[in-house]
Image (cartoon, rainbow, N blue to C red):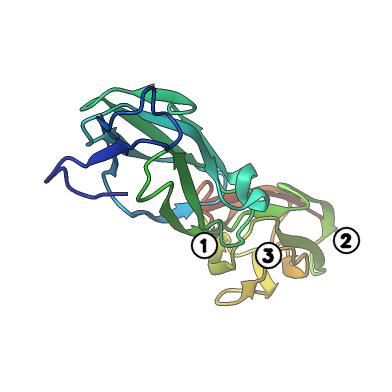
Amino acid sequence: MRLAPSALLLGTLISVNGCKGASSGEDSGVDAALGALTVSGTTLDFGQVTLHDTSTRTLSYFNGGAGPLTIFDVQLDDDSKRPHWSVVGGGPSTLESGVGVELTILLTPRTVADPSTKLVILSDDPDAPRAEVSLRAEVVGVPQLRVDAELLDFGAVSLGASAELDIMLANTGSDTLQIQTVGFQSGGQGVFSLSVNPTGSTLAPGAQNGLITVKFTPTGAGSVNERLIVSTNDPETPELGIVLMGAGSPP
């Protein structure tokens, strides 16, 4: 494999009397030009790639020799990494001198495990029959907030009494969920408060033990509505709203 087309590789085949391929008793000479594989790089670094997202890079190779070059295969070195990668273009072919091929390499990480592997180009280049290109990437997980209720209805609560309801929080994502703030859109209106406030806490991927406890203490007869806002580092839903409903009733 070569990284710059600075020279053409020329091989010479010589047949002599008594050697295989000689057609007469006289010495004869035959010059055969050989192909030479040249690749645009030895490493493709995809950087950070979010889990389940797709990132694309391109790679090219060409025949930098004077004769034809046979490409036997373009493949990934590690079968266990194949679910993460796709290669568009390339494959078995014969390239004349100066002819090249562009590959599109796609990475779609299925897990947060390291997907790094090698792309292998097999050819009849006598100096480099196996060319390797390192494919590198770092998979970044994504936190995802889920709650067991997006509406809390306290119903009728007697004046002078209180009622509490819980909201369970879960992280169904692949990275740590940070619960940044929990608060009321309208300040609680003097009747809603938090008995358990998880602001500043975190949930590991798969954790389901986050808890918010909302307390309703009506100060007058009639219905009251409020909205609880949970702010996290979930990129899809950085602010999740939960509707709160309750009514004060005479004792």
Residue depicted at 66% across the width and 48% down the height: 79
Question: Which mark is in front, 1 or 2?
Answer: 1
What is the residue that sits farthest to the left in this orientation? 6
What is the residue that sits farthest to the right in this orientation? 251
Helix, strand or loop at label 3? It is loop
For the residues labelled 3 and 1, the Cα–Cα distance comes to: 31 Å
Location of residue 37 in the rendering, given as x and y in whole percent from the top left corner: 31, 40
Q: Given the image, on which type of amino acid does mark 2 rest?
A: Pro
Q: Residues within 10 Å of mark 3 (few under 14, many from 20)?
A: some
Q: Residues within 10 Å of mark 2 (few under 14, many from 20)?
A: few
Q: Could one spot residue 136 in this view of the protein?
A: yes
User: Which of the two residues, 11 or 133, is positioned nearer the viewer here?
Assistant: 11
Q: What is the tally of numbered marks visible in this picture?
A: 3
Residue depicted at 57% across the width and 68% down the height: 179
Of the numbered discs 2 and 3, the one sitting upstream in the chain is 3
Q: Given the image, on which type of amino acid does mark 3 rest?
A: Pro
Q: Could one spot residue 54 in this view of the protein?
A: no
Q: Residues within 10 Å of mark 1 (few under 14, many from 20)?
A: few
**Residue marked by disc 1:** 187
